[in-house]
Image (tube, rainbow, N blue to C red):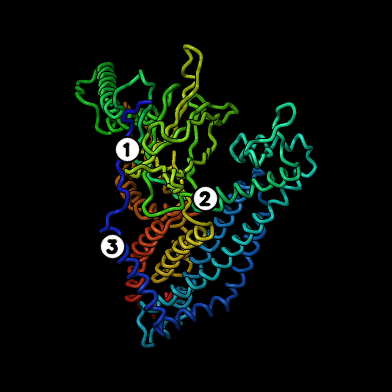
Amino acid sequence: MDSLPFFSFETPFLMSWVGMGLRGLLLAGLFGAIIWSLADRRIRHVAALTWKTAFRLRFMWVMILLLVVIVGGLPAVLRDDGSAKGMAQIILTYTLSMTTGILGFATLWLAVGSMARDIGDCQMQMVATKPIARWQIWLGKWLGIMGLNLLLLGLAGSVVYGMMEYRASHMDEAQYKMLKDRSDEEVINLAIQSWQQGELRIEQVVQVDEEKKVLKEDAQGRYIPRPIEELKRLLASLPRKKLREQVLVSRASLDLEDVLVLYGTNNLGVSFRDWRKSNREAEEEKAMQEVLKLMQQNVAAQKQGERITAVPPEMQQQIKRDIRLQYSMLSQLVVPKTGRRLVFRKPFGSFNEDRGLVLRFQLEDSRMSFKTDRKYKMSLYYSRDGKEQGPPPQVRLYSARTHIEEPLIAVARMVTEEGVTNKISIFGTNDLMYVDLFNEETPQQGQEYLGVIRLPFVDDRTGELNPRGIEVMYYEGGFLKNYLRALAIVFAWLGVLAALGLAAASFMSFSMAVFACSGVLLISFCTGIMKDVVADDTVMQTWTDGQRDASIVDFFAVNSFRVMVSVISPVKDYSPIKDLTDGRAITWGQLARAYSYIWGLSGLLIFGVGTLIFTRRQLAITDSDE
């Protein structure tokens, strides 16, 4: 098969050394300041008072009981799809989401109450007269609250992890009980089906002649299956194995360097990059002329004297967006007897090649917007140079709108005549590997559209490559390490909420501070709507005479939404729960980026504003005096 440039997407393999250095300095300074603060006796004393207050008000006991009941009791009432993977994803998603939500609201309440109550009850006046700066009081309260959060998050996280490990370790017995009463024929058919799906090897299902190294056959030439009891134990272990390989694992993705189109040998086309540019610009010009003609006809019908010579700029932008969206959709359609070649780059640093790679993708039927039972014939081939020097192409039947995971061999071993074993990596000298997905559908003549398959590797909104549309994943580490990094990001969120509560209570009463912080939380759930308003540059969604309507509040609303989106969205983007349930690696780089923004930028901004206001506030004036 010949290949042509299809889609080029240049992304830096690593962030610039300057950015890494600045981020490292920021994090070193941030955590260095926290360690220095813990060494300060006055700050530690304020933190200890915060702990005493939480235990005196029975806050800690209520939170411990609530978390144990929610985390321990919630999985008992939740229903999954019956699979081990579904069970694990349901437990992780709901328990961690509920834990984050409960601790988030509790953190705000404790932060607001700790500061506002001390000021309202005039207790802060006694503390402020001591030889301690107000910023030290503010920081001591934050450290005390975060110490409580660390204790509660560690408790909830330990319960969730223990529950997952317990269920995973006892999964074999539960599955074996389901197979115990199955007939021998049903067990053999299940084993054959698992082999056809690539979950088992043929030698695990059929007996092997160890001397001749061949599969055993009976008198009729049929393969002899292994003992039924052995097959039952083997089938019972498959759900746990799949759980360990797909969910309770840490897998990182290779960088997608390029995508190319594949045609038959005698059916070469032009570069898609050139085709997309020339055809899209022609379509945009044609659409502009048609809209201009309609607008001129509308003006003439209304007998108005003005003359329209150009399409309004906002309408031009909308037309271009629509056409680019159309071309993004077309670029993902794979007609019969064509395919796509995906070029992936080797990860930075070493990784365990013996554990292999996993190709993760999904197909979509271009004619249907829902999942069907139909199977689609695709061939898969991968190599180190795009030539026929790798494993032979595999023709498989795939279901649409389901996550497909195909194991790939990352390294092969060859023994030379001298008896030396050489490793041959799937990555070539340029550190690239090539994966070909080819549409093997053969529709009836005149009905080629029935065999068109959609590979969603482009972001439909931006038209850029979607790195999670089709990806090759490698083993990065175990589940425990990934789980701890996920909890660390949740801990970073709680730190911002604690700072937000303290900052609000530094100049507001308890009730107003709770109201303001709750409003900020509600706004954070509406960032999707705000992004749409910013993209449209108006809050109106209606059109009049071919022009989008405007509102008198657009200037204030659009600019306000733009600021809120730029501040809130990056914090929400570092969401570890979805990646954790998908078995994706939350890398140390992602963890560093999360803390550098959530604490290094957002946290320091809130800390600066909160301490400045608290330092300048007259503590003698309280709500009871007004």
- Position of residue 376 relative to residue 507, above or below, is above
Q: Which of 47 and 24 is in front in this view?
A: 24
SS under mark 2 = loop
SS under mark 1 = loop
Report which quarter residue 284 is drawn in.
top left
- Position of residue 336 relative to residue 94, above or below, is above
Q: Which of 18 and 176 is in front in this view?
A: 176
Q: Name the residue beneath numbered marker 2.
A: 583
Sequence-wise, which precedes: disc 1 or disc 3?
3
- The amino acid on which the numbered mark 2 sits, given as a three-letter code, is Gly
Nearer the camera: disc 3 or disc 2: 2
SS under mark 3 = helix
Residue ID at (48%, 40%): 359
- Which quadrant is the N terminus positioned in? top left
Report which quarter residue 37 is drawn in.
bottom left
Give the left or right position of residue 260, taking residue 575 as reference: left
Q: Name the residue beneath numbered marker 1.
A: 550
Sequence-wise, which precedes: disc 3 or disc 2?
3
Number of other residues with Cα within 10 Å of mark 2, as a class: few under 14, some 14 to 19, many 20 or more: many
Give the left or right position of residue 51, taking residue 587 as reference: right
Q: Distance between the residues labelled 3 and 2?
A: 30 Å
- The amino acid on which the numbered mark 3 sits, given as a three-letter code, is Leu
- The amino acid on which the numbered mark 1 sits, given as a three-letter code, is Ala
- The numbered mark at residue 22 is 3
Residue ID at (72%, 50%): 174
Q: Which of 462 and 401 is in front in this view?
A: 401
Q: Outermost residue, bottom direction?
A: 130
- Which quadrant is the C terminus positioned in? bottom left
Number of other residues with Cα within 10 Å of mark 1, as a class: few under 14, some 14 to 19, many 20 or more: some
